[in-house]
Each structure stands twice: as C-alpha cells, then as structure tokens.
Amino acid sequence: MSLMTSAVRKPLIAGNWKMHLGLAQSVDLAKAVRDGTTGSPAEVAVCVPFTALSVVAEVLKGSHVRLGGQDLYWEAQGAFTGEVSAGQLCDAGATHVIIGHSERRRLFGDTDEAANKKLKAALAAKLIPIVCVGETLDERQSNQTFRVLETQLAGALKGFAPADLPPVVVAYEPVWAIGTGVTATPAQAQEAHLFLRKQAAKLYGEGFAAGLRILYGGSVTAENVDNLMAQPDLDGALVGGASLKAPSFSRIANFQVTAKA
Ligand code: PGA
C-alpha cells in the first residue's frame, strides 16, 4: 500500500510519437485517438512532432484529448536555431510538454540543469510538464537506480516555490525498458514510483507528493497496461511505440483497473 492516497490523482495517458508520421498520418491517428478514447478514465494526450502540432490541434479542438510537444527551449525568443519556445508550443495549441526524455539526455546532451530551466519555462507558460527520469541498465545492475532517480528528480525540481509545482507530472522511464519490449514488472515500477513519491515529499512536502502524478514509461502495451495501472503509485503512462497505432493506444487509454493493488 502506498502511504499516500491516489484518490486525488487523475490518471494521465500520454502518447509520445517521437520522430514518426507525416502530416496526413498524424491527422488520421489523432482522429482515431480522439474517437477511440472518449470513455477513458484518464486525461489523454498525444505529444507530437513540432511540425504536426497545428494540424493535430485542429483535429483535437473541442475534444477531450490534449496536445503536447516533446521538448522545448527555455528562452522566450531569439537566435536559437532549431529550438522551439514554450510560447510557440502554446501558440500551436499545446497544453503539455515532455521534458528531459532519456533520448534527449542520451542523444542530445540534455542535463538535469537543462531540464530544470525547461521546467521553469514550461510552468511560466502554463504548460503541463512531463518530466522524465530513469536509470540505464548498467545503473540498475550496479544498484544505482535510487541514486539516479534522486539526482534527476532533485535536479529538475530545484528552486521552485511550492505553489508553482502542482501542474508537474513525473514520468519514470527506465532506459532499459524504452523501445525494447522489456517492460518493468509492476513490482519494479511500483518500487521506483513509491521511491520518487517519497523523494518528492522530502523536496516539497507530503501534500505535493500526494498530488504528484507519476507516469510509467517503457514498452507499455495494450497487454500489460492493466497490471501496471493496478499499482498504487502508478498514475498513468507515457507510451512510445504503442501510441503509433490507434487500437493499441486507445486500449491503453481505456485501461481497466478494478481496484488498486
Ligand atoms: P516505448 O517508449 O513505449 O516505445 O518504450 C516510451 C517513451 O520513450 O516514452
């Protein structure tokens, strides 16, 4: 049992389309997700490539499905070739944004300090930030998982006023589970989520921690979502591969949990 009740936490199921799909395919998938998830118990969002934001926004307008970017830059404007600001994301119709995804960290050098600045910019723009943390396989095998999670969470959440933080969502994404087909077991995920929630309580108090939504990401599928979501400290999922097909993503968004474990 979690120490802190999940009653106040509305689940969030977010798709991360990564660098996939052209505009026509994006529109088709967004329509299918919109129509296939009307019964979802969760807040549903799709995080799409920057180039697809406005066309997908048009499809989702007035619907229950929210739209997110996959990254942002912390400056408001200026000579930052290739970057996209929080204001530009909002302007294109986004309400959510992923921050510090492990692919950004591993392939593009994003640090905890960058995640912290991005988080500040996202919150200032009233975007709902999904801050990703997670250990590599090496780190897990050398018993460093908790140390890594503690460092990444504290780094990203550093220096805020508690009143600024309620919109923040954290995603636990073990790097070894992303895109590999190897999912963390429900017990492994729960252990990490509970640890993160306790760390959040240390940083900003029990009230913040009890309301903090912590998503799991890493090879979530239509087949394993129900067992994962049954864990008391799992408040949703960040879904990569399985978000690219409407039937699997809709099934994930329509997850079925009768009672939390
Ligand atoms: P996956 O990706 O579901 O394809 O493992 C998850 C993610 O990277 O957010």
Image (cartoon, rainbow, N blue to C red):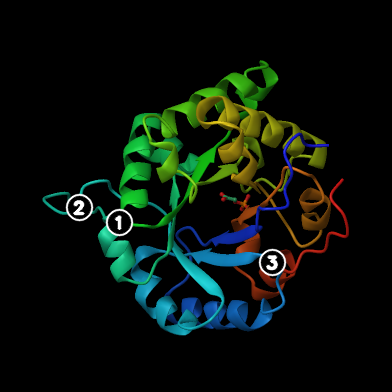
Total of numbered circles in the picture?
Answer: 3
Q: Residue at x 42, y 64 (%)?
A: 95
The reply to whether the C-beta atoms of the residues labelled 2 and 1 are less than 8 Å apart is: yes
Secondary element at tag 1: helix
Which quadrant would residue 12 be assigned to in this image?
bottom right
Residue 220 visible within the image: yes
- Establish whether ligand 1 lies closer than 8 Å to the Cβ of label 1: no
User: Is 19 displayed left or right of 257 in the figure?
Assistant: left
Q: Earlier in the sequence, mark 2 or mark 1?
A: 2
Q: CA distance from mark 3 to mark 1?
A: 26 Å
Q: Report x, y in % for residue 174.
A: 63, 37
Badge 2 local density, few (<14 within 10 Å), some, or many (20+)?
few
Residue 253 is marked as: 3
Q: Callout 2, which amino acid?
A: Ala
Question: Residue, x 82% and y 50% (percent of image)?
Answer: 230
Of mark 2 and mark 3, the one earlier in the sequence is 2
Give the Cα separation between the discs numbered 2 and 1: 7 Å
Q: Position of residue 165 (x, y in %)?
A: 45, 43
Q: Secondary structure at mark 3?
A: helix
Mark 3 is surrounded, within 10 Å at the Cα level, by few (under 14), some (14 to 19) or many (20 or more) other residues, namely many
Disc 3 vs disc 1: Cβ atoms closer than 8 Å? no
Measure the C-alpha gap from mark 2 to mark 3. 33 Å
The image's mark for residue 76 is 2
Q: Is mark 3 within 8 Å of ligand 1?
A: no
Which structural element holds mark 2?
loop
Please say if 259 is above or below 40.
Answer: above
- Residue furthest top as drawn: 142
Could you tell me the amino acid type at mark 1? Ala
Question: For the residue carrying disc 1, how many other residues have a C-alpha within 10 Å: few (<14), some (14-19), or many (20+)?
Answer: many
Q: Which mark is residue 86?
A: 1
